[in-house]
Image (cartoon, rainbow, N blue to C red):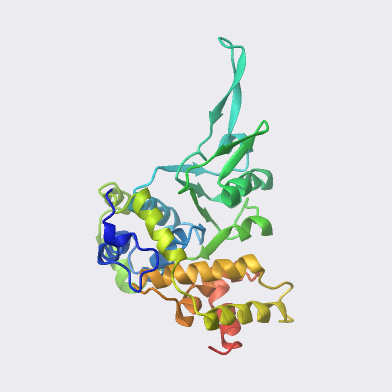
Amino acid sequence: MNIPREVTDTSPETLPAHFADTLQRAMTCVGGILLGKEKTIRLSLAALIAGGHLLIEDLPGMGKTILAHTLARVLGLQFRRVQFTNDMLPGDLTGTSVFDRETGKFVFHEGPIFTEVLLADEINRASPKTQSALLEAMEERQVSFDGISRPLPPSFFVIATQNPIDQHSTNPLPEAQLDRFMMRLSIGYPDAESEIGILRGEDRRAQLSLLNPIMDSQMLAVLQTQARHIHAADSLLGYIRELAEHTRNTARLSFGLSPRGAQALLAAARAWALLAGRGHALPDDVQAVFPAVVPHRLGLGNAMECESHSRDLLDAVPLP
């Protein structure tokens, strides 16, 4: 895809019309599959534009896999889906060496993790050992095997889905793994109008097969660069720092938000501002992404319970 010269500026005051139109089309396209979930869709795109990984947690049948598959298709990226099970081994994900009789050497065969978008479906059904195999890939975007580090694509993302941990045969993700996800989202039940639309419409998987990519890896890379250069005033940085400090001094929390968590909050707020077509981030952007970015880093329940916890934390810190 050719990027027009005027959209390569990395410090725009407003999002160039070309990209604004593409992003709106992408959100509309995903919204045609996942009805009535505009904020969830916007948060998902913000996470990917901010360069983060996405965890979608909800009950079975709520559309987790459909959302992940639709996002990957609309982004126009190479996509692989892995169904995590309790007997899955790390090598099933990362790959393994196989002896080649003709050459007399071991040859590495890449696993499904070597892709641009990896859908880790029902990630918490796998063993902790297999879950941890994702850690290096999510943080370093590389896989080490037999002392050799093999790079993953620059646009590598993990979109993981999981059922609540009280479901049968599930293993909660360790804290270190949870921290690698920029956002944790819950889709929730649809409203009445959307559910009627779901019942009236075609099967969503059939609709998905008709979708055409709206973006590609080149456009996504430019959007990510633009998001990193969204202006954040010192007062906004101070606001994020005060939010983090409040979590560290709240008695009901065992631990507070780490500096890396605060960086993730800023990155997500910048991406949210970009999706709004602005070249600067506002406190409203921080508040919009806070419930998706922060609670899972503080051990606050599951994704379906995070809204009320987030509101209490946000209300305790005055706006700049």
State left or right for residue 293 relative to residue 69. Answer: right
Q: Using the rendered view, name the quadrant where residue 36 is placed.
A: bottom left
Q: Position of residue 103 (x, y in %)?
A: 57, 11
Q: How many marks?
A: 0
Q: Position of residue 229 (x, y in %)?
A: 45, 67
Residue drawn at the location 61% of the way across and 53% of the way down: 168
Q: Quadrant of residue 260?
A: bottom right
Up/down of 87 relative to 204, above or below = above
Instruction: Please tell me which residue lies in front, 245 or 171.
Output: 245
| Residue placed most toward the observer, 15 or 213 | 15
- 12 sits left or right of 50 in the view: left
Q: 142 or 183: nearer the eye?
A: 142
Q: In the figure, is residue 223 to the left or right of 129? A: left
**Residue 43, position in %: x, y?**
44, 67
Residue 157 coordinates in the image, percent (x, y): 49, 51
Which residue, as the protein is rendered here, is positioned at the far top? Answer: 102
| Whether residue 89 is visible | no
In this rendering, is residue 108 above or below 215? Answer: above
Q: Is residue 223 visible?
A: yes
Residue ID at (58%, 67%): 263
